[in-house]
Amino acid sequence: MSTTVPAREIRAVYTEETVTVYQAYEPGIGLPAAREGRFPPGWKRDRMTWIKPSFRWMMYRCGWGTKPGQETVLAVEMSRAGLGWALRHAALSHFDPAVHADRDAWRSALRAAPTRVQWDPERDLRLRPLDHRSLQLGLAGAAVARYADEWIVAIRDVTPLAHEVHTLVRAGDLDAAAALLPPERPYPVAELDLSHLTPPAAAAG
């Protein structure tokens, strides 16, 4: 049986109703969010916010919760319906000739979209880039309001998990580190959700 991972694929922890994404914030934002299950007033709704279904990519981005302003790692459980809306209304952050007719078409789609997608190299436990890519989803405008007020089901502080996995990685115990990782699996999305975001042969999930 082939174990080849598609070049672009959403992998996540999910249930029938929800999907888990990750974000990292300074403690003044992250701790109240985890405590209350919603973002506090100091969270800026007028800025684009990026959510990531991949725990390892989040660890790469926040340095295992050590980078300034990203010391609190959050696992945000959001509705699958919300993720579907975000994907249907998304545009790619970068021009892709396999998806867009030309650069003008891409720019027009980007201006009109409340969400945007980046496919970034997935990371291994040592945070080295892998050949396949992982989803980053940027939310702006109406999408930010929907995310904060409608889509979020629960928020957990997973900073201790990040630190525990990092400690094992630094000790060279990659098997023990891998055993602690959230059990991400290919996320089932309808082809319509990704057809405008990936080349036809790359759409998977």
Image (cartoon, grey):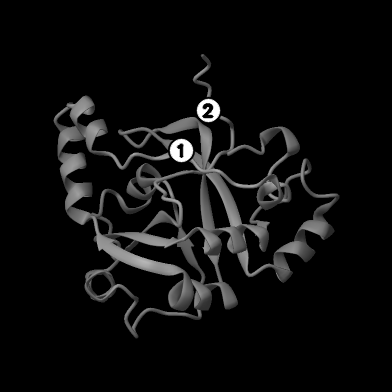
Viewer-proximal residue, 66 or 21?
Answer: 21
Q: Residues within 10 Å of mark 2 (few under 14, many from 20)?
A: few
The amino acid beneath tag 2 is Val
Q: How crowded is mark 1: few (under 14 residues within 10 Å), some or many (20 or more)?
A: many
- x, y percentage for residue 60? 36, 45
Viewer-proximal residue, 148 or 15?
Answer: 15
Q: Residue 150 carries which label?
A: none
Left or right: 24 as drawn, with respect to 138: left
- x, y percentage for residue 64? 26, 49
Residue drawn 16% across and 43% down? Answer: 164
Do the numbered discs 2 and 1 sit on residues whose CB atoms are within 8 Å? Answer: yes
Label 2 secondary element: loop
Residue drawn 50% across and 80% down? Answer: 46
Instruction: Tell me the residue that label 2 is attached to.
Output: 5
Eye-nearest disc, 2 or 1: 2
Give the number of marks: 2
The amino acid beneath tag 1 is Glu
Residue 191: which quarter of the image?
A: top right
Residue drawn 71% across and 64% down? Answer: 110
Instruction: Tell me the residue that label 1 is attached to.
Output: 122
Left or right: 46 as drawn, with respect to 63: right
- x, y percentage for residue 172? 18, 26
Residue 141 visible within the image: no
- Residue extending farthest bottom: 41
